[in-house]
Structure formats: C-alpha cells, structure tokens
Amino acid sequence: MLPGAAADQVDTILDEAWELSRVVALRPEPFGALAYHFDNRRLIFLKRPELVEVVRGLGAAPDVRTALTRAGVPAGQWAAYARALRGLADADVIRHRETPGEAR
C-alpha cells in the first residue's frame, strides 16, 4: 500500500461510526483486555488500556475521532490508533455502524 493511501485510510476511519461487534466480549486484564470472538473463537489481546477505552466508547460516539477525544488520546497518536482499529475491524472485533443519515 502506498503511504498516501494509508493516510487516506486513516483519515477515513476517523470520520466513520464503529462499534464493538455483537459477537465479541471484552474481558478486562491488567495490560488492557482480551477480546473473544464467539463465532470464530478467536482471542485477541488489546495491549493498551487506552485502546480498550476507545473500543468501549465507539458505540456511544458519532465517529472514531470523538471516541479518541473522549478517551483522552492525544491527536498525535490518532494515526497509530486508527491503524490498530483497522486491524480490529479486519478481525471483526469492531464493525461499521450505520449512522441515521446513511443509506441502507
């Protein structure tokens, strides 16, 4: 992937609405949390408490940018969090959430 394309992907996710997948449970751990996917039985480690807070806050936030802000993540770290969230989306830990104005 080209660096510009990666930056575009980061910018895109920041403005999108996401939520924890309904088939995923988060179990708090001292290092962050374990995410267990009940459908594919996959176990994923979320190694930062701040990332866990962002993931938990996604459903109540209109977009990722707001979830990051509410979790107190500095703007300089948003690109790294966006990449982590893309990885969680690829693993179906989080899923895209339609907002009221989106077409179905």
Image (cartoon, rainbow, N blue to C red):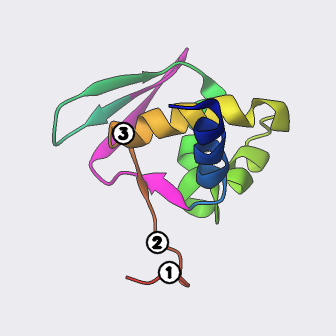
Q: What residue type is labelled 3?
A: Asp
Check residue 32 in the rendering and tell me which mark sits there, or answer none: none
Badge 3 local density, few (<14 within 10 Å), some, or many (20+)? few
Location of residue 22 in the rendering, given as x and y in whole percent from the top left corner: 32, 54
Q: Mark 2 points at which residue?
A: 98
CA–CA distance in space, label 1 to label 3 = 22 Å
Q: Mark 3 points at which residue?
A: 90
> Element at badge 2?
loop
Label 2 CA crowd tier, 10 Å (few <14, some 14–19, many 20+): some
Q: Is any part of residue 101 visible from this angle?
A: yes
Counting residues from the start of the chain, the first of labels 1 and 3 encountered is 3
Task: Write the residue at 52% across / 38% down.
Answer: 85
Give the image quarter of residue 78: top right
73 or 82, nearer to the observer: 82
Marks 1/2: CA–CA distance: 6 Å
Circle nearer the N terminus (2, 3): 3
Label 2 sits on what residue type? Glu
| Vertical placement of residue 104 versus 89, above or below | below
Front residue of 9/55: it is: 9
Q: Is residue 97 left or right of residue 8?
A: left
Measured as percent of width and height from the top left, residue 104 is found at 37, 82
Is 11 covered by the magenta stretch? no
Which label is found at residue 102?
Answer: 1
Q: In this view, does 31 lie to the left or right of 27?
A: right
First to last magenta residue range: 17-34
* The quadrant where residue 52 appears: top right
The image shows a total of numbered marks equal to 3
Disc 2 from disc 3: Cα separation: 17 Å
Q: Is mark 1 on a helix, strand or loop?
A: loop
Q: Do the residues labelled 1 and 2 touch (CB within 8 Å)?
A: yes
Q: What residue type is labelled 1?
A: Glu
